[in-house]
Image (cartoon, rainbow, N blue to C red):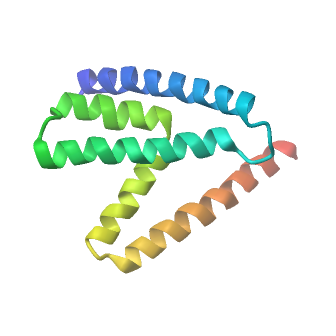
């Protein structure tokens, strides 16, 4: 387990650094109120995690260690939205309509509510 944690951490470090650089580049290129950096990493991360999961499921080209490095580590460090998007896809694929609706609604509404609450607590 410790080895897997180190592998995930290394992948996360690379993903986080790439997220930082992508955000800075987007801010330089597209100075606007729209959060282009976050949007860009979320969209790219969703595509990349789809490729990695597809490779792992269909061709078994990704070993368990590479899975931890690429999916948990790299994609998790680059964007956690990619994991949310993949979970939503799996729920739809398995026709768990109620769980899909609850997961999407609760994730976004609770996420927004808790960001507001956390910020409100700090502001006093």
Is 63 situated left or right of 82 in this image?
left
Identify the residue at the far bottom of this view.
98
Quadrant of the image occupied by residue 11: top left
Up the image or down, 62 lies above or below 83; here it is above
Q: Position of residue 2 (x, y in %)?
A: 27, 23
Q: Residue at x 34, y 70 (%)?
A: 92
Q: Is residue 34 visible?
A: yes
Is 89 situated left or right of 109 in this image?
left
Identify the residue at the far front of this view.
29
Q: Residue at x 64, y 31 (%)?
A: 23
| Frontmost residue, 97 versus 42 | 42
Quadrant of the image occupied by residue 10: top left
Question: Which quadrant of the figure contains the N terminus?
Answer: top left
Up the image or down, 47 lies above or below 111; here it is above
Identify the residue at the far right of this view.
124
| Frontmost residue, 71 versus 102 | 71
Q: Residue at x 43, y 37 (%)?
A: 76
Q: Is residue 80 visible?
A: no
Q: Position of residue 113 (x, y in %)?
A: 69, 61
Q: Position of residue 43 (x, y in %)?
A: 51, 47
Up the image or down, 9 lies above or below 36; here it is above
Q: Position of residue 93 (x, y in %)?
A: 28, 69
Q: Which residue is drawn at 54% across and 70% down?
A: 105
Is 3 situated left or right of 104 in this image?
left
Total numbered labels:
0
| Frontmost residue, 122 versus 101 | 101
Is 104 situated left or right of 124 in this image?
left
């Amino acid at each position: 387990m410790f080895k897997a944690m180190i592998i995930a951490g290394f992948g996360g470090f690379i993903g986080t650094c790439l997220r930082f650089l992508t955000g800075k580049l987007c801010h330089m290129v597209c100075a606007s109120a729209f959060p282009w950096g976050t949007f860009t990493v979320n969209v790219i991360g969703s595509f990349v995690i789809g490729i990695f999961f597809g490779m792992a499921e269909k061709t078994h080209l990704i070993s368990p260690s590479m899975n931890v490095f690429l999916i948990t580590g790299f994609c998790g460090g680059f964007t956690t939205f990619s994991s949310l998007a993949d979970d939503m896809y799996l729920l739809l694929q398995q026709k768990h309509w109620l769980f899909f609706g609850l997961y999407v609604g609760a994730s976004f509404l609770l996420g927004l509510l808790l960001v507001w609450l956390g910020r409100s607590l700090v502001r006093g």
